[in-house]
Image: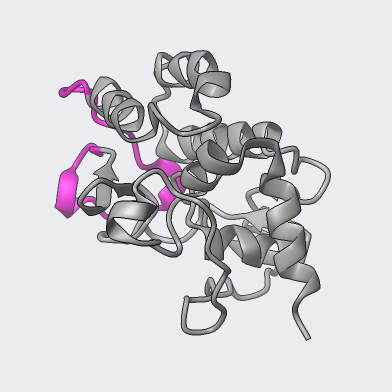
Amino acid sequence: MYTTDLQYFPNLIYIFTLLKARAIIFSGERRYEKGSFLNKMELAGSNGVLKLSIPIKGGRSVALPYKEVQIDYKTDWQTNHLRTISSIYGNAPFYPFYENDIRVLYGSKVTNLFQWNLQCFDFFLRKAKMSNLIQYRIEIPVDQPTEKTRPILTTDAYSLPPYSQVFGERIGFIPNMSCLDLLMNLGPDTATYMNDCLNKLP
């Protein structure tokens, strides 16, 4: 059983790592890490990598277990993220098929960061037809022993092959973007792409 944190629309290496493990525990017990991908995702924009961050209550000074971290709605970050996603992927092949559902997703207000990330992760699994490929459960009872949380692989450890991106012809392929980037560009072929990568491993 692979134990790890749950990120915001995780990058592809993260997804690939989960796919290799198959059975996952998402833990919210560890202390929230500033600068991590727990509240950030990266998209392939027209000028390169574009980072989106979810504001959290307490900002940089927050020192809570991940499961207790709350989202700060003083700014309308959901509308801003939605506009950015629409701006980047408006011309992506599969954006029109997911647009309404993405708007519904970003129209819901979730207090807890962990729960929001879980909602986004479930959205990806369903739309990518990968719900049967990655099985997970939430949290770990504190009175039971747990295995050490494993790190996610980096691009140095394994390089996933390029796929067509919206601005690829202009600025070239950008690897290891958010899984949302893959979904908008490959749609239902996302699961095939990830499985092909897995099958090519020695």
Q: Quadrant of residue 17?
A: bottom right
Relative side of 145 to 84, left or right: right
Relative side of 89 to 120, left or right: left
Q: Quadrant of the N terminus?
A: bottom right
Residue at 44% across / 16% down in the picture? 103
Q: Is 65 a magenta residue?
A: yes
Relative side of 98 to 40, left or right: right
Q: Is 104 a magenta residue?
A: no
* Residue 87 image point, x, y percent: 29, 29
Relative side of 56 to 189, left or right: left
Magenta range: 55-76
Q: Is residue 147 above or below residue 28?
A: below
Q: Quadrant of the C terminus?
A: bottom right
Query: In front: 38, or 30?
Result: 38
Residue at 42% across / 32% down in the picture? 112
Q: Is residue 105 above or below residue 195?
A: above
Main SS, magenta region, reads loop
Residue at 27% across / 20% down in the picture? 79
Query: In front: 149, or 79?
Result: 79
